[in-house]
Amino acid sequence: MYLLLAAHSRGAVLQQLTQAGHPEPANPEPRPVALTDLAAVVRDLEARRPGGQPPRWIWHRTQDWYPALLKSGVEVERCYDVSLCGNILAFSQFSAQTEYARNTDRVPVEDPMLPPKALLPPRPPADQGALFEDPNAGAAPGVSLEELRAEYSAQQAAMAAVDTAENRRNRLQLLLAAESAGAMVAAEMQHTGVPWREDLHEHILSGHLGPRPAAGQRPPRLEALAAELRGLLNAPGLNPDSPQDLMRALHRNGIEVKSTRKWELRESSHPVIEPLLEYKSLSRLHTANGWSWLDAWVDGGRFRPEYVVGGVVSGRWASRGGGALQIPRQVRGAVHADPGHKLIVADASQLEPRVLAALAQDSSMAEAARDQDLYAGIAAKGFGGDRAKAKMALLGAMYGATSGEAGRLMPQLARIYPRAVDFVERAARAGEAGGTVTTRLGRSSPPPSERWYQSQRSSTAEEQRRAESIARSRGRFTRNFVIQGSAADWAACWLAELRRRLRTLRADGAVGSGAGRPELVFFLHDEVMVHAPAGRVEACIAAIEEAASAARELLFGPIPVEFPVSLAVVDSYDRAK
């Protein structure tokens, strides 16, 4: 059963659809539901499963509806996120010939001259989370039923028009399902939160920085380092947090650097370098994950960031705040399992190179990938066993490093793995020519803007050089987009499959021993973290590995490329790697 969930003057409205997107003959009329009653209605429909299958909820944005349902104790099994799916259909080369794509008014990037990495949709209204708490609340979030029905029908018509050659329609349908499932995972992880011990975080901060300072003051260790820097640079008024102030002081002392990046500073032997690098490291800790961060983002022993599904043009996730996608090693010890629980940290080993082998159907690289360490397998075949060189060559091919040592190693890599190298070279040439590339499941790179095309219509030698540089930059972007994006496709399927299996474990009281629910609590590109009762660890590990295998089959079918998952069962995140 398909159910539209949209805004209504009384709060919310439901309408049952057939799979084709039209109202069910037996229930054609929309059903108004007060927001205060919505959670109970959804819970009842999920439990009853009319027709034997759980309903699929069709809504404009998962974030508009699902967080409030979760807060009311209601989980749903399936959804279709109209906004996320529309973003894919509007720009996918699989659906480019459809009326939906031709008439879209969506804008993929603000300035595609050099495509940005992140596309963050607007933050939802601040009071959105209170919708189910106020019996006098006004209209529900999102669009009206008529708008939602029209948009969903247009998307279904677009899908029906997608060519079935090379299984394109099924692949694109899988991407839409995985993206929608990811939206539910993101909301559920935000609701559950990452287990976080505030006392351990405080201990970590005091160990590195000293006691908590007064508002607006530096911690004692940073203040001591600042004084040391002033003395070594003979700059009594130096503010080491000011890049301009710091650069002037360095230059006055003969340290001729163009930036304060770590690698550049290390080229100098001046005695100020080590305390300066320590200051920069500790300052980042204080700014990004210090006491203010702890106050703002951790509550009740949980860190609840807001994930943005598809927030990067390649399909990778982003986050709006709290640094969810970059928990630094210094504070990972604060990510700690609850009593009687374990953290299961799993990451897909060398995912992008393995995806390249599968995309290019390079049997030689697939053979190397059968080893747990793909780089070692490559090194053994053509780089005299030098793993570092093999890794440099392969990463250079995927990211477009055509100069330096990586460039010198490229011909050797091309001789050994011609199909893989040709695959990324063709993607690069497409980008340089202003074309687009598409991931395994159908997400396409953003097209160039008119400004980009104008940049290529050069008349002088200087303009020609600039145009060539811009074209090469776009080529590097498309070269990696197809690999990173296909890896994101795989990760989306992995997440969706793992969510389904964990839900089955939670429903099966006979699995393992001990109370509690195994839950997904963290995801980062190719890594997941499950918080599980100690008695269910083995069952969760099996679910993680089975989900990874299923994701490979869904994307590529029965291919000889292995996608191994590294696993660590720990009490705290810092013990995982």
Image (cartoon, grey):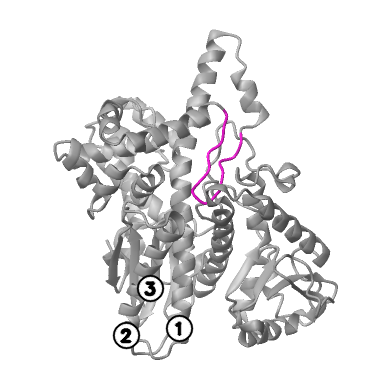
Tag 2's secondary structure?
helix
User: Is residue 477 highlighted in magenta?
Assistant: no
- The quarter of the picture where residue 231 lies is top left
The answer to whether residue 557 of the structure is visible from this angle is yes
536 relative to 445, above or below: below
How far apart in space, not on screen, are marks 1 and 3 (Cα)? 12 Å
Residue found farthest to the left: 384
Residue 68: % across, % down: 65, 75
In depth, the one of 203 and 322 nearer the eye is 322
For the C terminus, the quadrant is bottom left
For the N terminus, the quadrant is bottom right
| Mark 2 nearby-residue class (10 Å; few <14, some 14–19, many ≥20) | some
Q: Which residue is mark 1?
A: 506
- Start and end of the magenta stretch? 434-447
Residue type highlighted by circle 3: Ala
| Mark 1 nearby-residue class (10 Å; few <14, some 14–19, many ≥20) | some
